[in-house]
Structures are given as C-alpha cells and as structure tokens.
Amino acid sequence: MGSTSFSPSISLSPSLSPHSSKFPNPSPDLFLRSHSSFTPLTLRSNQTRYRFKKLPSSNAPNFLVAASAKAEPLKVIISGAPASGKGTQCELITQKYGLVHIAAGDLLRAEVAAASENGKLAKEYMEKGELVPDEIVVMMVKERLLQPDSQQRGWLLDGYPRSSSQAAALEDYGIRPDVFILLDVSEDILVERVVGRRLDPLTGKIYHLKYSPPENNEIASRLTQRFDDTEEKVKLRLRTHHQNVDAVLSVYKDITVKVNGNEAKERVFAQIDAALTHVGEQRKVNSGSVAA
Ligand code: AP5
C-alpha cells in the first residue's frame, strides 16, 4: 500500500501540528519532502489518517514521498464446498483478526426468516440446492461490503462469489480481496459434516453432534437443523458447487491459498492463520518498497 491508494475524498489540513491532541498516535505515517518550507501536513480519509512531516535533506526535490503508510484493512474471501467448514473457520478468524464476517448464506437466511419478497424467492432456490439469482445476491453482498464497519475493520467474505458472474460483479465494483482461501475437503467428510451440523439459534454458534458437541444439555435442547442440511440436499448443493467452482477459482488464482480442510478445526485454522500472517507481512514489505 502506498500513496497511490488515497481515496478522492481526502482532505488537506496543513494547519494541524503533528503533535496536536487530535492525533493520539504521535508517530507519523507518511512524510512530506519539500526543498523549501516544511509545513506539517495531514491527509485524512474516512479510514486512515495520513500524516506528513519534513525530511532532513536540504536538497530534496519538491514532491511527496510515502515512507510508510498505515496498512489498509485486510480483505479475505473464504471458499469451499458446502460444509467444508467456512463458517467454523470464520468464527476463529474474526476472533483473531477482528474482520467483519459477511456470509452470503446468512444474509439470505435472514431474508427468508423475515419472509421478504427476496427471501421467499431465495428459499425456492436454496431448497433445490441451487444458486439464488444474482439480482438478489449481488447487491445484498455489495451493500454489506461497503458498510462503514467492513471498510474500517476489513472483511471476511464467506460463500461469495459462487459463479463467474458474481466474481465479475465484484471486479466491476473494484472490490478485490488480498487473499482467497480455498478449503479443500473430501466428499464423504462433507456429507458427514452436513448431516451432523446443528445451530444454536440464540448465539448463532455452529455445532456438530460428533465433532463439536454442545457444551451442556441446555444448549443441546435448543439446537436447530438447517432446512437444507439433509443428505439428499447436500448432494444437490455439491453438484452446484462443482459446476461453478473452476470459474471462480480462475479469477483469483494468483491470490489463492489452498488449505487442507479435512483436519480438525484447530489444525485447519493454523494453516489459515499462517497464510493471513504471511499476507500481512507481504503488505508491510510492499508498502515499504513503495516508499523507497
Ligand atoms: P451457505 O449457507 O453458504 O451454505 P454452504 O456453502 O453450503 O456452506 P455451509 O454453510 O453449509 O457450510 P460451511 O462451509 O460454512 O461449514 P460449517 O463451518 O458450518 O449457502 C446455503 C445456500 O444459500 C446455497 O445452497 C445457495 O442456495 C444459497 N447461497 C449462498 N451463497 C450464495 C451465493 N453467493 N449466490 C447464490 N446463492 C447462494 O461446518 C459444517 C459442519 O462441520 C458443522 O457442524 C461444523 O461443526 C463441522 N466442522 C467444521 N469444520 C470441521 C472440522 N475441521 N472437523 C470436524 N468438523 C468440522
């Protein structure tokens, strides 16, 4: 990340001192190099505050140098077949990285529960294990991605895009992740995970009767099962997944990290954690090289 990523809404505030109380962190993010006067300068956008100060060189040319910029929030897509463990891993990722979890399936189920027009239509497709039409899904996801919390904290997009047209829509909006995580799980394990999955309607937590059982009888008594979590329906969902997965992968092949999702959830998370740490380090290196 460097000076090229400034948004057009940035405002200049040359009168502010770098040690003003408006800036709780006195360490500057960016430096202004000018051969004459060195007025402390601040650039601000909605997400990031960029600050400039003079550099010691007296022969420096009159232009801006981005020495180090505060990294933009992380943007992650997690993908995988039905019941590959996306939701389970998203819980662990958000706990550690604080990203906003945006799950296309959850957004759709909220519409179904609200019995909205979109929800009624979506349910017809979900029951058949087919993709809900783009007219419903694309705007819904885009709007959630552009909410202030997603923009400020970064986002973790789960279950979207699922087709080339959905991926193309994201690209058209200029929305691109830093990394695309693909959970790779064998088909027999997927079916077992689907039929054993249960949800706690109170906390939203995902359980599995065998692999992740509820902590006590009180929770066990209120667990529910998703309407599309039957062996018959997961086979339809898997067919839809296989029809579309290659087209989506081709859009993100340069940033894809394939993770072995057959292992226990902690081991799967360890792989993802390592990948996200690596991405974070790369971003730091890149922002440094832009500055040089
Ligand atoms: P969606 O809700 O996204 O379902 P899905 O992709 O089929 O994925 P799941 O939510 O079933 O599984 P998951 O990968 O999150 O696994 P989980 O962590 O729960 O979509 C549902 C429907 O909505 C679609 O069929 C479609 O109709 C529609 N839709 C959604 N997105 C759409 C889009 N973009 N466009 C159009 N339509 C869309 O884990 C599963 C179980 O396994 C749990 O019980 C868990 O405890 C257990 N488990 C997880 N990890 C492990 C592990 N490592 N070891 C042992 N058990 C594990």
Image: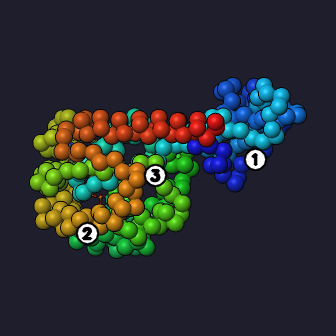
Instruction: Report the Cα–Cα distance between label 3 and label 2.
Output: 23 Å
In front: 282, or 50?
Answer: 282
* Residue 135 found in image quarter: bottom left
Residue 221 at x, y = what percent?
A: 17, 44
Quarter occupied by the N terminus: top right
The residue that mark 3 highlights is 177
Tell me whether circle 2 and circle 1 mark residues in contact (CB < 8 Å): no
Label 1: few (<14), some or many (≥20) within 10 Å? Answer: few
Question: Considering the numbered disc 3 on the image, is that residue within a helix, a strand or a loop?
Answer: loop
Q: Which mark is residue 11?
A: 1
State whether residue 41 is above or below residue 132: above
**292 or 53, nearer to the observer:** 292
- Disc 2 to disc 1, how far (Cα)? 47 Å
Mark-to-mark CA distance, 1 and 3? 26 Å
- Which residue is outermost to the right? 36
Circle 3 crowding by C-alpha within 10 Å: few under 14, some 14–19, many from 20: some
Query: Percent x, y for residue 160?
Result: 38, 59
Q: Quadrant of ligand 1?
A: bottom left
Residue pictured at 16% horizontal, 64% vertical: 235
Quadrant location of the C terminus in the rendered image: top right
Amino acid bearing label 2: Gln
Q: Pick whichever of labels 2 and 1 is earlier in the sequence.
A: 1
Q: In the rendered view, does 4 fall on the left or right side of 167?
A: right
Q: Earlier in the sequence, mark 3 or mark 2?
A: 3
Q: Is label 1 in contact with label 3 (beta carbons under 8 Å)?
A: no
Give yes or no for contact between labels 3 and 2 (Cβ–Cβ under 8 Å).
Answer: no
User: Can residue 150 be seen in this snapshot?
Assistant: yes
| Type of amino acid at the residue the image marks with label 3 | Pro
Question: What mark, if any, has residue 243 been given in the picture?
Answer: 2
Percent of width and height locating residue 124? 28, 73
| Callout 1 amino acid | Ser
